[in-house]
Image (spheres, grey):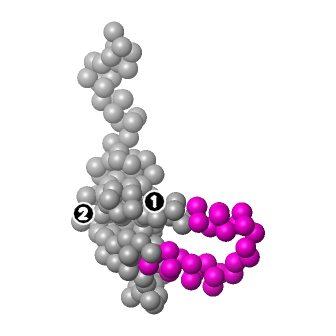
Amino acid sequence: KLHFAIHGQTAAEVIVDRADHQKDNMGLTHWEGAPHGKIHKYDVSVAKNYLSEFELAQMQRIVSAYLDMAELQAMRRIPMTMQDWEERLSGFLKLWDRDILQDAGKVSAEIARAHAESEFEKYRVVQDRLFESDFDRLLKQIEGGNTPDSDKE
């Protein structure tokens, strides 16, 4: 529901729509070690890794506000079921004039994961060819006559 409220797609739909081995960084905008680190298989199945800075900022603010509301409920010791939380989330999103997901979306999590991993296998070939590790950069620096300590002088 949160992804849909931010950009009109479920998490699975975002992955299928944005994961593309032909795009820079496979369409990812965030991943462990970004922007220079290698993209790993576990990075490509996380929908928020494809969000723009603007989308991510909105997501963070909405989640933070919702968790604050949940904490207030807990402080008041009001028992809540999962159904109660789902209804509260819909009401919360409606309060903020957000579209509310009414169904499960068009793409399952399994299909999204399979798509992302398939795209990653194609992307990995290119990434492995182009990736330059810290060790590789250090070797080039030393071969060029520079040592790591010579930069400090």
Residue 113 x %, y %: 45, 75
> Looking at this view, is 114 or 16 the one in front?
16
Amino acid of disc 1: Gln
Q: CA distance from mark 1 to mark 2?
A: 25 Å
Magenta stretch bounds:
68-94
Kindly identify the residue that appears in the image at 29 percent across and 66 percent down.
Answer: 21
The relative height of residue 110 versus residue 62 in the rendered view (above or below) is below
Amino acid found under the numbered disc labelled 2: Lys
Label 1 SS: helix
Magenta segment, principal secondary structure?
helix
Label 1, residues with CA under 10 Å away: few <14, some 14-19, many ≥20: few
Where's residue 19, x and y in %? 33, 69
Asked if the stretch drawn in magenta spans residue 29, the answer is no
Question: Residue 4 versus residue 153: which sits nearer the camera?
Answer: 4
**Looking at the image, can residue 33 be seen?**
yes
Residue at x 43%, y 64% (from the top left corner): 59
Q: Which residue is mark 2?
A: 23
| Residue 14 seen in the current view | no
Which one is in front in this view, the residue at disc 1 or the one at disc 2?
1
Residue 91 is a magenta residue: yes
Q: Position of residue 78 (x, y in %)?
A: 73, 73
Image quarter hosting the C terminus: top left
Which disc is residue 60 wearing? 1
